[in-house]
Image: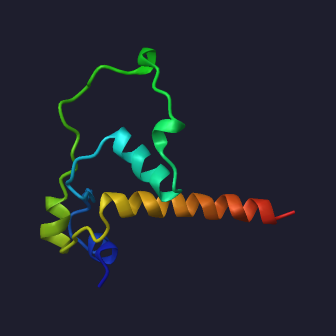
Amino acid sequence: MPFVDRALATVDASLFKLSSSTESCRLQFCAEAFAALGLDWERYVVTDPAFIRPAEADLLLGDATKARTKLGWVPRVGFPELVRRMVAADLALVSARRVAP
């Protein structure tokens, strides 16, 4: 049974966090997204120090322990692959809009 079905079938109606439990940052996201397009992100992205927020937390990291123990869920896609899939999905949407009248 897929993990979503198991989540819906649980007796307690609780929330499950799905997370790779790995750390990443915005710069890594930019690097992966631009790399998926064969581009160097540093040639296109400018950081304005005026818009950098002070750190609100030392570390923001998802904990999928509950989903793993109760549902048997484990991440099958790592961060780089997830970003590549997101870029591919956006490209597909843009391409579809260009073709449509």
Q: Position of residue 30 (x, y in %)?
A: 43, 44
The quadrant where residue 93 appears: bottom right
Residue at screen point 37% across, 39% down? 27
Q: Which quadrant of the rendered structure holds the C terminus?
A: bottom right
**Residue sitting farthest toward the bottom:** 1
* Nearer to us in this view, 48 or 56: 48
The quadrant where residue 2 appears: bottom left
Q: Which quadrant of the rendered structure holds the N terminus?
A: bottom left
* Nearer to us in this view, 27 or 76: 27
Q: Is residue 54 left or right of residue 82?
A: left
Q: Is residue 58 above or below residue 16?
A: above
Q: Is residue 64 left or right of residue 93?
A: left
Q: Position of residue 3 (x, y in %)?
A: 29, 75
Q: How is the image coloured?
A: rainbow
**Residue sitting farthest toward the top:** 50
Residue at screen point 53% across, 56% down? 37
Residue at screen point 15% across, 61% down? 66
**Numbered disc total:** 0
Q: Is residue 34 left or right of residue 4?
A: right
Residue at screen point 16% across, 67% down? 68
* Nearer to us in this view, 71 or 86: 86
Q: Position of residue 100 (x, y in %)?
A: 82, 65
**Residue sitting farthest toward the right:** 101
Q: Is residue 84 left or right of residue 71?
A: right
